[in-house]
């Protein structure tokens, strides 16, 4: 499978914020989110990007970094069928595994936390007439896939919030999933710098207090800035 980077850092989002982990970033994503901060990991056809590694080679590199938690991210890691074998191999070494996914592809992986980020209309590419926007709109939301993942795995739902209008869209989205505990719902400001993130927190946090949802700052931005490999 094509791998962009393998690095050690702290988890900056969601339930396990602050947990030292090894991040394995796969190449390739069928979506083209407007706010994507890992554009360099989108194009699976880029022959010059990343390296083609077997699951055994990936685990060998993970072992060298000596952390008990592994985060499989992307791109879209579930777009790589080899992830099934990779997760089984990682679990044989007793790793705790998080998979960060848009919830658009279901594979029989092994993981301890399925971190699902459903895509709102704020993710749509700007050019309304582009082929990438049409493809994104058609593929970005698969409620039946999300239900299957939530049924089989421990999970969290992370929503990227850009404007106040997104809050109403999130509540509407969640009517399809009435049994999700508010403690499993994380709202994360769309931002690539600490100033923007803190400004949006001023109106996202009160909404979280009202609904019981969790506010999730992107702590990696506060810790390291918007820098790849952190």
Image (spheres, rainbow, N blue to C red):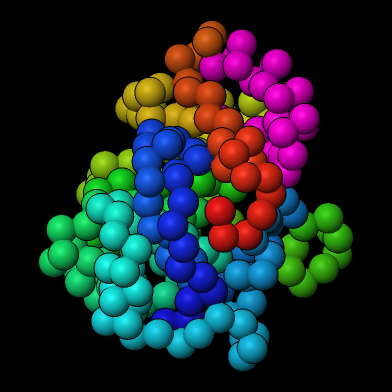
Q: Position of residue 10 (x, y in %)?
A: 45, 45
Q: Nearer the viewer, residue 102 or 59?
A: 59
Horizontal relation, residue 84 to residue 25: left or right: left
Quarter of the rendering containing residue 38: bottom right
Q: Position of residue 136 (x, y in %)?
A: 66, 62
Magenta highlight range: 187-208
> Residue drawn 58% across and 31% down?
217
Q: Nearer the viewer, residue 176 or 97?
A: 97
Q: Is residue 187 above or below residue 72?
A: above
Quadrant of the snapshot with the N terminus: bottom left
Q: Position of residue 108 (x, y in %)?
A: 25, 65
Residue 120 visible in rendering = no
> Residue drawn 73% across and 44% down?
192
Tell me if residue 188 is in the magenta stretch.
yes
Residue 98 visible in rendering = yes
Q: Nearer the viewer, residue 225 or 160?
A: 225
> Residue drawn 74% across and 39% down?
193
Quarter of the rendering containing residue 15: top left
Residue closest to the far bottom: 47
Horizontal relation, residue 90 to residue 133: left or right: left
Q: Is residue 156 above or below residue 209?
A: below
Tell me if residue 198 is in the magenta stretch.
yes
Horizontal relation, residue 116 to residue 87: left or right: right
Q: Nearer the viewer, residue 39 or 183?
A: 39
Q: Position of residue 94 (x, y in %)?
A: 15, 58
> Residue drawn 86% across and 60% down?
127
């Amino acid at each position: 499978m094509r791998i962009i980077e393998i690095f050690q850092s702290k988890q900056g989002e969601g339930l396990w914020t602050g947990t030292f982990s090894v991040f394995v970033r796969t190449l390739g994503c069928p979506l083209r989110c407007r706010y994507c901060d890992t554009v360099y990991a989108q194009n699976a056809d880029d022959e010059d990007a990343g390296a083609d590694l077997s699951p055994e080679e990936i685990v060998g590199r993970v072992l060298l970094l000596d952390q008990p938690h592994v985060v499989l991210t992307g791109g879209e890691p579930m777009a790589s069928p080899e992830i099934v074998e990779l997760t089984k191999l990682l679990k044989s070494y007793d790793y705790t595994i998080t998979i960060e996914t848009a919830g658009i592809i279901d594979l029989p992986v092994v993981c301890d936390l399925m971190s699902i980020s459903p895509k709102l209309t704020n993710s749509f590419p700007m050019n309304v007439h582009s082929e990438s926007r049409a493809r994104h709109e058609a593929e970005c939301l698969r409620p039946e896939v999300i239900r299957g993942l939530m049924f089989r795995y421990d999970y969290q739902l992370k929503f990227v919030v850009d404007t106040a209008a997104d809050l109403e869209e999130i509540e509407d989205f969640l009517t399809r999933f009435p049994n999700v505990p508010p403690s499993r719902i994380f709202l994360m400001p769309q931002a690539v710098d600490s100033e923007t993130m803190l400004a949006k927190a001023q109106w996202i946090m009160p909404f979280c207090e009202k609904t019981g949802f969790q506010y999730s700052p992107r702590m990696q931005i506060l810790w390291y800035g918007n820098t790849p490999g952190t």
